[in-house]
Amino acid sequence: MYEKKRFFREPIKTEIQEFHAVEVEKDLVETILSIAESDYILLPKGLVPEKYPSSWNFLRHGPFVRAGLRERVTSFVKGARVPVDFRIDSFGALESQAYAGYAYSPLTIVPYVHRDTRERRVSLVECLEGARIDAYVHQVPAAHVGIEEYSRAGAVKKDGAIFHVHVPRRIKGMRRYQFNINHVPVIDNADKWGIAWATMTQGHDCLRGEYLNIRFAKQDTGVFNWCAHEIAGYFAVIRTLNERGNKVPLQMSQFALPTPLTVDFYKRLCDSVLVHDEELESKDKIRKLNKAEKEILLWGLVGKKGHHPTFFAKDKIKDYDWSLRHRE
Ligand SMILES: [Zn+2]
């Protein structure tokens, strides 16, 4: 059995059940934000829309928030809009429904022709977990992300830089993941717009393992799913370059940076919410939130509070407090 490192350990169901259960009367997002330390929320199952046969199916086939291709092409022609501008627009125009993440595609028009044109998908849960790994490597002695730059000088201008990163795992006693992040925009030129939509990794596929378990691998081939390790690797690239006075990787980042409000909300999802699920085999039919439910609730927070209060971080994410309630 894998054991999580102390920094990542969350209370288990029975630890949460020692507290006082409350039901949600009206606004779920506000109830979660204001839940008292002595309480936890017991939700009926039903966050994932019924038409999806399972939570994993929803995460694969549910609706994604997308930046329109036409707006992006126009913006490149005019030059000026960076990825966060598209998130501000699309996060600000959510419909009232459950979302499975946000997505974007590399441009396939000249001069932005990239070989890997798979749609890139980002889940807010993976952004939060990437931020948690980022805090871990800065707050726990001896933990760190290793970065080596492997760029060919001539190609960097047009294709972006390549970084080889080593990112720690959240479970004990396992070697760090090692992989490349390709197409990282590092030069402040006209090509940075095209490069930023093509950024991806090579040699890492931990989410594929999750999908393989439930036999979704085949349907997954046209899509590139960003995971927490890769996002934490990109955060480390941002910081390393920033220390050299280069803000281009930050400016062109495709990842939503959670604010302290969002981290607190997410922490409550991990330590103060349980679900009553009749389909469970366990006697009490109670479980913790699954990934799809956390994703839906994070989008609920964005829908209620807007982009800037939730994912426009001004504070340094490495310094966030990730301590959880109800842990022994
Ligand atoms: Zn991963």
Image: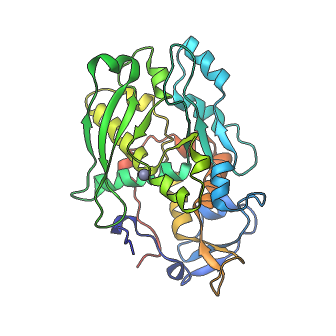
Q: Indicate the quadrant containing the N terminus: top left, top right, bottom left or bottom right.
A: bottom left
Q: Which residue is at 47% across, 74% downward?
A: 11
Q: Is residue 260 visible?
A: no
Q: Nearer the viewer, residue 55 or 134?
A: 55
Chosen colour scheme: rainbow
Task: Please say if 258 is above or below 12.
Answer: above
Where is residue 42, by image quadrant? Answer: bottom right
Decide if residue 153 is on the left or right side of residue 45.
left
Task: Please say if 244 is above or below 202.
Answer: above
Task: Please say if 35 is above or below 203.
Answer: below
Q: Nearer the viewer, residue 205 or 58?
A: 205
User: In the image as oriented, which residue stretches furthest toward the right?
Assistant: 51
Q: Which residue is at 44% across, 67% downward?
A: 324
Q: Return the x and y of residue 114 as percentages of the image width and height.
A: 49, 24
Q: Nearer the viewer, residue 262 or 80?
A: 80
Q: Indicate the quadrant containing the C terminus: top left, top right, bottom left or bottom right.
A: bottom left
Where is residue 107, by image quadrant? Answer: top right
Task: Please say if 10 is above or below 236.
Answer: below
Q: Which residue is at 53% across, 82% downward?
A: 14
Q: Is residue 149 visible?
A: yes
Q: Nearer the viewer, residue 311 or 55?
A: 55
Q: Return the x and y of residue 23 as percentages of the image width and height.
A: 70, 74
Q: How many discs mark residues in the rendered view?
A: 0
User: In the image as oriented, which residue stretches furthest toward the bottom?
Assistant: 283
Decide if residue 52 is on the left or right side of residue 183.
right
Q: Return the x and y of residue 47 as percentages of the image width and height.
A: 71, 61
Q: Return the x and y of residue 317 as percentages of the image width and height.
A: 40, 47
